[in-house]
Amino acid sequence: MIKGMAERVLLDTDIGNDIDDAVCLAYLLAQPECDLLGITTVTAAPVDRASLASVLCRVADRSVPILPGAGVPLVGPPVQKPPPQAAALARWPHDEVFPVGEAVEFMRRTIRAHPGEVTLLAIGPLTNVALLFAVDPVIPSLLRRLVLMGGAFAGDHGPEWNIHNDPYAAARVYAGSARVHRSVGLDVTTQVRMDAPEFLSRCDHPLLRPVADMAASWFAERPEVTFHDPLAAAAIFAPELCGFARGEVSVDTADGGTSWRAAIDGPHEVADTVDPQAFIGHFFATVNGAA
């Protein structure tokens, strides 16, 4: 695809705890239709998270601005722990110096420079995004779309982790008036899983080798990867992977629980169906097709 026609994406991530953030970033770096304008990191030890993101950018030979953002939620003590995957930094070349305190302004400037063209993909706690919307309330209307990996809208999943980490921020973000406001929640992401041995056996591509290394801490305690964040990213480029329903999302600021009310004129869309096998095929074809 011609560069000017590519999807312009800003990624906001808490890379470093669950392995799916790194898997998602690898996908975006491999996706030929993605013009990755920048990466911002959020929650505990955001500089370490920025360093982890830089590992993948270096492996991909891509110069992408990376800026550490908020390290604590808007209200209350941090819930998230520092990223255990930072142990892998000793084994991979990475950046160590980043512009601190500039993430929200970078997001604001980038979106205003490309009005109506930027997809903001947020796959961590929503602290940075809430601060962005507070600093410049026009920003939601200037986005092409806002895509979140977050929430749980059907079934008995309990509060989803990203929303739980900063429910006040999530409530503010869901109140924003983005023209397209999509959530890919646990209802669909938990249907897309892979056992650790199978996933590691498919990490031959250079982009996935550091991901496999970072995954060691994750797989030490869990036997599988769930493709929460990569599914949210892939649905931008392959919309047939998920079906979406329109309505309104409410956030319980006590614990980050989300509730969903279907409405044809609602401000939000939530994923309600997924084709797991189509996603797996799309993901590995995209990454393995990267130069």
Image: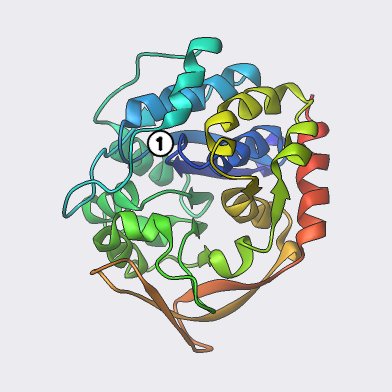
Measuring from the top left, give residue 286's x and y in whole percent: 78, 40
In which quarter of the view is residue 250 placed?
Answer: bottom left
Whether residue 93 is visible to the viewer of this picture, yes or no, is no
The image's colouring method is rainbow
Q: Is residue 11 rendered to the left or right of residue 135?
A: right
Closest to the observer, 6 or 227: 227
Q: Is residue 78 rendered to the left or right of residue 56?
A: left
Closest to the observer, 138 or 218: 218
Closest to the observer, 81 or 187: 81
Up/down of 263 relative to 45, above or below: below
Q: Which residue type carries mark 1?
A: Thr
Q: Is residue 37 rendered to the left or right of residue 70?
A: right
Question: Residue shown at 35%/14% (left/top)?
Answer: 97
Q: Is residue 146 rendered to the left or right of residue 101?
A: right
Badge 1 density bin: few <14, some 14–19, many ≥20, Cα 10 Å: many
Name the quadrant of the N terminus: top right
- What residue did someone put label 1 on? 40
Measuring from the top left, give residue 276's x and y in whole percent: 76, 61
**Residue farthest left in this picture:** 76
Question: Residue shown at 62%/51% (left/top)?
Answer: 226
Measuring from the top left, give residue 115's x and y in whole percent: 46, 51
Image label count: 1
Up/down of 136 relative to 26, above or below: below
Measuring from the top left, give residue 127's x and y in whole percent: 29, 50
Question: Residue shown at 83%/41% (left/top)?
Answer: 285
Name the quadrant of the C terminus: top right
In which quarter of the view is residue 249 placed?
Answer: bottom left
The kind of secondary structure element at disc 1 is strand
Question: Residue shown at 57%/23% (left/top)?
Answer: 57
